[in-house]
Amino acid sequence: MAAAAAVVTPSGVEDGVSRSRGEGVGEVVVERGPGAAYHMFVVMEDLVEKLKLLRYEEELLRKNNLKPPSRHYFALPTNPGEQFYMFCTLAAWLINKAGRPFEQPQEYDDPNATISNILSELRSFGRTADFPPSKLKSGYGEHVCYVLDCLAEEALKYIGFSWKRPTYPVEELEEETVPEDDAELTLNKVDEEFEEEETDNEENFIDLNVLKAQTYRLDMNESAKQEDILESTTDAAEWSLEVERVLPQLKVMIRTDNKDWRVHVDQMHQHKSGIESALKETKGFLDKLHNEITRTLEKIGSREKYINNQLEHLVQEYRAAQAQLSEARERYQQGNGGVTERTRLLSEVTEELEKVKQEMEEKGSSMTDGAPLVKIKQSLTKLKQETVQMDIRIGVVEHTLLQSKLKEKSNMTRDMHATVIPEPAMGSY
C-alpha cells in the first residue's frame, strides 16, 4: 500500500521516496522500489526510537508489566494474538499522549471495533488510512508500523518535541610516533629522559650551569691553593640530604625489549628452573601413584587367576552348553528349512483342493438346480408358438401365391383369345 510505505523519517525524507514540504504522510503515491519490502524494518526501528523519546518504558511497560518489544517486533510474525494486543495497547497510549482521550482496550473487546476506533482517531489527526482494517488484525506488517509511527509523531508534536541537527565531535589527530629500540642506551636518550624528569618535577629542578660555575670556581680556588690540604667545606648531613633528593633523578632505567634474544634466553632459564623444581615435587607423587597402580594390577591379576581356578568346571560346562546350543540351532535351521518346504507344498495342495471343491460345487448346483429345465421348457413353448406363426404365414403366402398363379393363368387365356383376330377385320386395315 502506498499509504503504509509513506512514513517520514526525522530528516523529513522517506527511505527511497522523497516528497515536498507541507505534504502529509501517505498523500504521495509513488511506485515502490525493490527495497520497499524492507521499508517496514526501518520504520519499526524509527518507531522504537520515538517510543524511547516518549519514555514508554517507564509510563507504559512497567505499569502494565509488559515486556519491551524488539526492534523488529511488529515487522515479523511471532505471536499474532500477543502482537495485536501490544499494538492496541501502544496505539491507545499514544493517542492519550497526543492529547486525545482514548480508553485502554481490554482482552475481550471486539477487535473490529477497536481497530475502527484507532483508525478514526488516526484520521482525526489528518493522516490517511486507505487500506482495509483487516490488515491490522494480524498485529504485524507495514500497516501496523505505519499506524504506530504516525501516532508516535503526533504525540511528539503534542509534547513540543522537535528534531535538531546532529552535532559531531571534533576528533584530534594524534601524531604518529616511531617506536625506538629501548635496549640501546645513548647519551642523547639519557639527556632526554633527564629533561623529561626535570619538566615533570619542576620543584626539584637542578640548574646545571650553576653547578658547573660552582665547580669551576672550586677548581680555581683549589689550583690557587695547591699548597693547602684538600678539605671539603660542605656539611656531611647537607650532602647526604642532597644525595637523597637527587638520587631518584640520577637513576638510569634501561627498558628491555621482549623481542631481544637475551630476554628469551633468560625466560628459558627461568622456565627450566621452574620445571625442574616442579618435577622434583611431582616425581614423588607420580612414583607413589605408579606403585599403587602396580599393586592394584597385581591384586586384580591374582584375583582373576583365583576366580578362573574356582570356576574352571563351570566354564567347561558353559562351553559344553554353548556347543549343544549351536548344534541345536543347526538342527533347528535344518528343520525350519524342511517345514518351509512342506508348508509351500501344503499351500499348493490346498489351492488345488479349493479349485476341485469349487468345480464340484458348480456341477452339483447345476445338477440340482431346475433353472435350466425351466429355460428349456420356455424355449420349447416359444419355438412352438413361432412354428404356429410360421405355419400361418406359410399358408397365407401359399394362398396368395395360388391366387396370383390363377390370376396369371386367367390373364394368359384372355390374352390368347384376344390375339386371335378375324380376317375381315384384318382386311379393313
Image (tube, grey):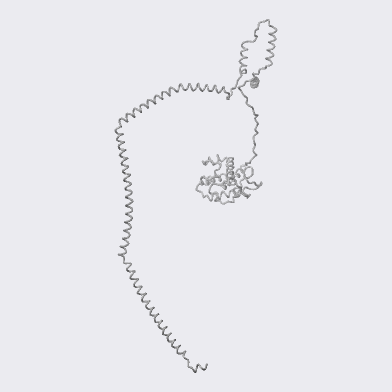
Residue at point 61%, 16% (across, down): 247
Residue 135 as seen in the image, left or right of residue 348: right
252 to 412, vertically: above or below: above
Q: Horizontal and vertical percent for residue 41?
A: 57, 44
301 or 34, nearer to the observer: 301
Q: Horizontal and vertical percent for residue 10?
A: 62, 42
287 or 205, nearer to the observer: 287
35 to 258, vertically: above or below: below
Q: Horizontal and vertical percent for residue 12?
A: 64, 44
Residue at point 64%, 42% (across, down): 11
The part of the image, by quadrant, that contains residue 402 is bottom left
Residue 69 as seen in the image, left or right of residue 333: right
* Res 279 seen here: yes
Q: Horizontal and vertical percent for residue 337?
A: 33, 46
50 to 382, vertically: above or below: above
* Res 202 seen here: no
152 or 136, nearer to the observer: 136
Q: Residue furthest bottom?
A: 424
